[in-house]
Amino acid sequence: MIDLSSCFKPPSQNGIIKMNNEFLGGLTLKKWIWIVITIVIAASVGGYAYARHSQNEKLYNDSMQRASLQISNKNYIAAETSFTNALKRKPSDKKATRLLSQTQNYMAANDSFSDRDYNSAKDGYQSVVDTRNGNETLKDRSKGKLSTIKTIQGNLKKYNKIYNQALNETGEGNYTQSNSTLDKILSDQTAKQSYYKSILNKAKQLRSKNNASLSGNTTTTPSSSSSTNEFESSTSNSSTQNNPNVAPNSSDSLTSSEKKAANAYKGSNEFTVNPKKNRINGQQITESQVNSARKEISAAEVDSNAMSDQDIKNIIKGAHDNHETIGQYVKARYK
């Protein structure tokens, strides 16, 4: 008979150990392979996120530096755009928001100054100076403007006092004395600056009338009631002076039923809107900002004359909330 036991000889103890080691070694190798793959994937994802964050941070810093440079170069609109771009990289960033608001306040104050609205300009420049951790260049320039406004208003007060005295003398028929009084304005080199153009022209016109009366070419005597106090008009806060869209008070022309309906009106307009909706960073939107925004809206080829002050304030707030300039905001929504 054939002995089959030799064909089914069980493996030796050493053979079993060797097989187990090979099996376990295979498992260990696979485990390490997956660990390495996991590490590579994690590193790739982390590296991408870090690279994206670094790129975003770089673009933010570039925009902020560019804005600062534009302010130094007095390119305020470009600075406004750069701050807006920085906010696109870091929405709600306090520093960019603060500097953007400060820049816009300075621009609005400049517009008021150019319009000879010195009271609004003074308020605007003061808000720039009061900005905590704001741009120091804007603060220094605002301080200079505030000093200039103080000088201008002081001179306007002096010149108007002289003019009114001369006007009274003309009204009394003292034409020679009136001319002598007017010389205090006409011979003053400071009065020839552009800030005083209006009062200087009035002084020249009154002198011409005095000379005409002295030469006997006219019997018309200027009335003191024709005097217009330029200092008062330059420091007036009347909205009808600064906003061509505000109509004079017409309540006297309303019928009793119209007045009753007006009093019963419960809607929301620029007079009934919640004041909190007209605030940016806790500060009320000023008349100076409204006037400046109107110019930017018109420059964007949108009819600002068809908008109320509240419409303008809504645009200012909307542009701020969307991190856009006034021009960008209205072009996207009103054209």
Image (cartoon, helix red, strand yellow):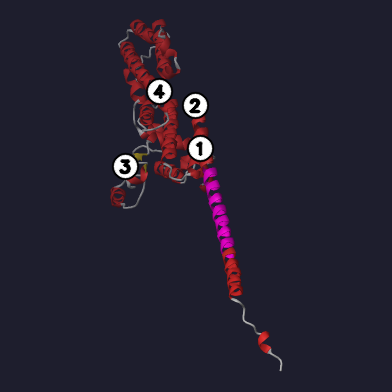
In magenta, the rendered stretch is 30-56
Mark toward the viewer: 4 or 3: 4
**Label disc, if present, on residue 145 of the rendered structure:** 4
Majority secondary structure of magenta residues: helix
Mark on residue 105?
none
Sequence-wise, which precedes: disc 2 or disc 4? 2
- Sequence-wise, the earlier of marks 4 and 3 is 4
Q: Image point 38% across, 25% down: which residue? A: 118
Identify the residue at horizontal 36%, vertical 42% (top origin): 279
The image position of residue 275, as x and y in percent, is: 32, 44
Q: Amino acid at mark 2?
A: Ser
Q: Is residue 229 visible?
A: no
Residue wearing tag 3: 251
Disc 4 to disc 1: CB gap under 8 Å: no
Disc 4 crowd rating (10 Å Cα; few below 14, some 14-19, many 20+) is: some
Residue receiving disc 1: 61
Which residue type does callout 3 highlight?
Ser
The quarter of the displayed image where residue 104 is located:
top left
| Residue 85 screen position, x and y as percent | 51, 41
Give the SS element for disc 2.
Answer: helix
Task: Give the amino acid at mark 1.
Answer: Asn
Query: Mark 2, mark 4: which one is toward the viewer?
Result: 2
Q: Which residue is mark 2?
A: 72
Residue 149 within the magenta-colored segment of the rendering: no
Task: Tell me how far mark 2 sits from mark 3, CA to CA.
Answer: 49 Å
Q: Are marks 2 and 3 in contact (CB under 8 Å)?
A: no
- Of 189 and 88, nearer the camera is 88
